[in-house]
Image (spheres, rainbow, N blue to C red):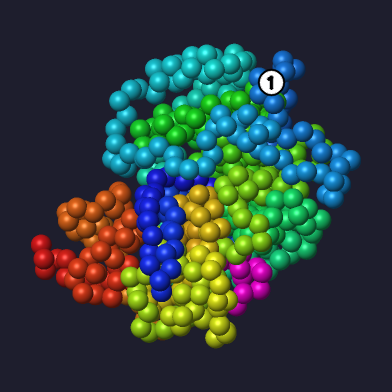
Amino acid sequence: MTRDRFFAMTLATMALGGATLPLQTIPLHAQGIEFGPTETKPAPTSKPKPPAAKPLPPIAAPTEPSPQPAAAAVTPSTRQPPAPDAANPLAAKYATSGLPPKAKPANCKNEQAFGPWLAAFRKQAAAEGVSARTISLALDGRTLDSGVIARDRKQGFFAQSFTDFAAKLATNNRVTNGRAQIKKNAAAFARASQEYGVPASVITGFWALESDFGAGMGKLPIMNSLTTLAYDCRRGEMFRQELMAALEIIDRGDMTPDTMIGSWAGEIGQTQFLPTRYLAHAIDYDGDSDINLFANPTDIIGSTANYMTHLGWRRDEPWLEEVIVTNDLPWDQADLAIKLPRSQWATWGVTKVDGSALSSDTMPASLMLPMGRFGPAFLAYENFNVYLQWNQSLTYAITAAWLSTRIDGAPAMQKPKREIAVLAPDEAKELQRQLKKRGFDVGEIDGKIGSATRAAVKAMQTKLGFAADSYPTPELLAALRSES
């Protein structure tokens, strides 16, 4: 999954009981491209396969090396994990972590007709070394797909509240199927855990949300989607790079335009890699001289772990933990941008969901209250930042991270302490407009309550004397209206 923009805030230090704790740069705005996890529920009964390939004629040696040489006859005990940035120049050529270009507003207008734009892009691809044959096979006859543009503009699924979103996506069915996949692919998961330090449940959580283990990869021509999105004004700068990477995939001989079938956003395979991610981080993990993210579980597992390591996954460290909070916590400290030692949260009365004490150590953690102080509470650790790089929808990131803990055996989510009011989409947009009018940068006025909006809500709650838990309530919206 991919990402849009998010803010970064550097908090220098915070004094705690005489000690000074350095706080790192933390992403604040987590409203991402949000291509969206699948809502399909049944697990596939057989391995999904892409359409039969129509092989290209033999081509000259590729201009870039394969992401990872075949690893046949190498055992997990002796094989060294790939070092993508060092061993694969494509990992450096295509920036696959950090912030993408800022998306333009949904009402932006294209300044050039599609035909002339495509002709210019073909010339650019040739100048960058893509063969004439690949350019012709991939781009001849391409037309603008208005349906893809409409889907990019909509993405309303992410405007739901966290609890509604999590209830629909982090289902018991996905927990059961995730555990079954771990058992079925035990050797590949054990190897990935040893070599990359990424737990099976973490990989499986993404795998479940992104495609239901292959049942929901999408059925659209990837090249058609990428060409449309590369032309469109909203995310053109980002998708022109993705389209170029897709041409390189074809030129290298990994796929043909006919076998590149996937989501409307041009993603590849069961954990939905964009083409740049495929080129930089997809690997032949079973040593059969073929990288197959459509139907080979071993390649899917290894490639996903490889990418997560690139994003900064920290071995043997947690990522998310549901907790119980007291009624009198200093709510302004419950913020993704604030990391405190776990011992501090324990001192303030935060406990594990079973009521037992947290580890009283210095491990940094943020307290997140996606539904405010009366809803579920989570401690987010350093590894949670990897989730936000995978997809910067805060709702998606928490859901994916929590699903992984459920696959690991965590209990069902705690019920809210009371009924929690949720702003309707139009009310959420009005709230964003009210905050923007007061000088806050909340990103696009889209009704999606990401971290930038939550930061602005917290500031206004503090100013107005409300409990500063960053959750937008009807009471806050009413107070802002009365100030207008």
Please, is residue 120 above or below residue 203 in the view? above
Labels in figure, total? 1
Please, which residue is most extreme toward the right here? 73
Left or right: where does residue 382 sit relative to residue 195? left
Q: Where does residue 345 sit, x and y in percent of width and height?
A: 46, 75
User: Which quarter of the image is occupied by the C terminus?
Assistant: bottom left
Q: Is residue 416 left or right of residue 386?
A: left
Q: From the viewer's perspective, is residue 32 above or below residue 349?
A: above
Q: Secondary structure at mark 1?
A: loop
Q: Position of residue 90 (x, y in %)?
A: 61, 30
Q: Is residue 164 visible?
A: no
Q: In the image, what residue occupies the spot 78% across and 63% down?
A: 183
Residue 176 placement (x, y as % from top left): 68, 69
Number of residues whose C-alpha sits closer than 10 Å to that of mark 1, classed few (under 14), some (14–19) or many (20 or more): some
**406 within the magenta span:** yes
Residue 107 quadrant: top left
Relative placement, left or right, of 260 versus 33 is right
**Residue in the picture at 47% in, 33% down:** 239
- Image point 41% across, 32% down: which residue? 236
Is 12 or 168 nearer to us in this picture? 12
Q: What residue is disc 1 on?
A: 62
Rendered position, 299 above or below 331: above
State which quadrant residue 325 falls in: bottom left
- Residue 456 makes an appearance in the image: yes
Residue positioned 29% across, 32% down in the render: 109
Q: Specify the principal SS of the magenta part.
A: helix
Q: Position of residue 361 (x, y in %)?
A: 56, 72
Q: Amino acid at mark 1?
A: Pro
Q: Which residues are magenta?
A: 400-412
Q: Is residue 88 magenta?
A: no
Indicate the quadrant where residue 108 lies: top left
